[in-house]
C-alpha cells in the first residue's frame, strides 16, 4: 500500500529529525519543509552543537528551504515541526510568508500561541499532529537529562 502524503506522514519525518537531535543531546525538536508533497528541507535543533541560541530546528529548515528555492519566501511551503514554534521561529515564519504551519506538541510557556506572536495573515495553522509522540520524546529527553545531572 502506498503511504499517503498527509500531515501525519510528514510529521513522522519531522519526528525522525527530532530523534537525530535527541541522539546529539540536543532538545529533540525536528522540522521538515514540504512543497508540492516533496520534502525540500530537513533540520533539527543544533543550539548546543553550534553554540548558537538561534539554531532552532525551524530556523535551520528555513535557511535550507530558502537555499533550495533560491529565494527567501516560502508562500507555497508547509513547515512540519514537532514542537510549537517559539516567538523567534514564529517571527521568522512571518517574514518568510510561510504558507502553512503544522506542529505536534504545544509549548504553553514559550510557544507563539500563548505569547500571541503574530504569524503571516495567510499562514494556515494545524496543531496537535502526532502530539503524543512528539510530547513523549521531549519528556524522555528531559527525564534523562535530569537523571544525568
Image (tube, rainbow, N blue to C red):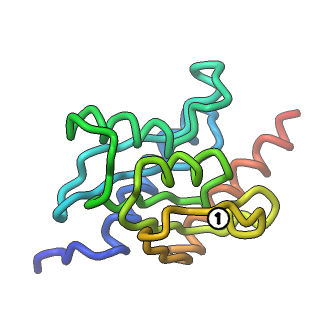
Q: Residue 100 placed where, x, y %?
A: 39, 67
Q: Nearer the viewer, residue 20 or 54?
A: 54
Which quadrant of the figure has residue 148?
Answer: top right
Quarter location, residue 119: bottom right
Quadrant position of the N terminus in the picture: bottom left
State the residue at coordinates (40%, 55%).
Answer: 97
Q: Residue furthest left?
A: 1
Question: How many numbered marks appear?
Answer: 1
Q: What x and y, as percent, mark residue 15?
A: 46, 57
- Say left or right for 87 vs 49: right
Q: Secondary structure at mark 1?
A: helix
Image quarter (top left, top right, bottom left or bottom right) of the C terminus: top right
Dividing the picture into quadrants, the one containing residue 23 is top right
- Find the residue positioned furthest to the front: 121
Residue 33 placement, left or right of 134: left
- Pinpoint residue 95: horizontal percent, then vertical percent: 47, 48
54 or 75, nearer to the observer: 75
Q: Please state the horizontal and vertical placement of residue 146, each as a whole percent of the image.
A: 85, 43
Residue at 46% across, 68% down: 102
Q: Nearer the viewer, residue 63 or 117?
A: 117
**Mark 1 packing: few (<14 Cα in 10 Å), some, or many (20+)?**
few
Q: Which residue shows up at 30% across the image and 44% down it?
A: 41
- 105 vs 143, nearest the viewer: 105
Q: Is residue 76 above or below residue 8?
A: above
Q: Is residue 78 left or right of residue 105?
A: left
* 43 shown above or below 74: above
Residue behind mark 1:
136
Could you tell me which residue is drawn at 16 percent across and 63 percent down?
A: 36
Amino acid at each position: 500500500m502506498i503511504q499517503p502524503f498527509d500531515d501525519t506522514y510528514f510529521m513522522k519525518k519531522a519526528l525522525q529529525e527530532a530523534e537525530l537531535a535527541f541522539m546529539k543531546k540536543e532538545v529533540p525538536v525536528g522540522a521538515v519543509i514540504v512543497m508540492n508533497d516533496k520534502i525540500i528541507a530537513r533540520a533539527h535543533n543544533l543550539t548546543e552543537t553550534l553554540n548558537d541560541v538561534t539554531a532552532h530546528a525551524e530556523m535551520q529548515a528555513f535557511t535550507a528551504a530558502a537555499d533550495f528555492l533560491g529565494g527567501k519566501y516560502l508562500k507555497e511551503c508547509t513547515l512540519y515541526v514537532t514542537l510549537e514554534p517559539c516567538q523567534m521561529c514564529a517571527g521568522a515564519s512571518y517574514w518568510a510568508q510561510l504558507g502553512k504551519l503544522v506542529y505536534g506538541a504545544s509549548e504553553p510557556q514559550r510557544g507563539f500561541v500563548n505569547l500571541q506572536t503574530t504569524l503571516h495573515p495567510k499562514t494556515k495553522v494545524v496543531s496537535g499532529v502526532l502530539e503524543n509522540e512528539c510530547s513523549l520524546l521531549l519528556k524522555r529527553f528531559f527525564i534523562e537529562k535530569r537523571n544525568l545531572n
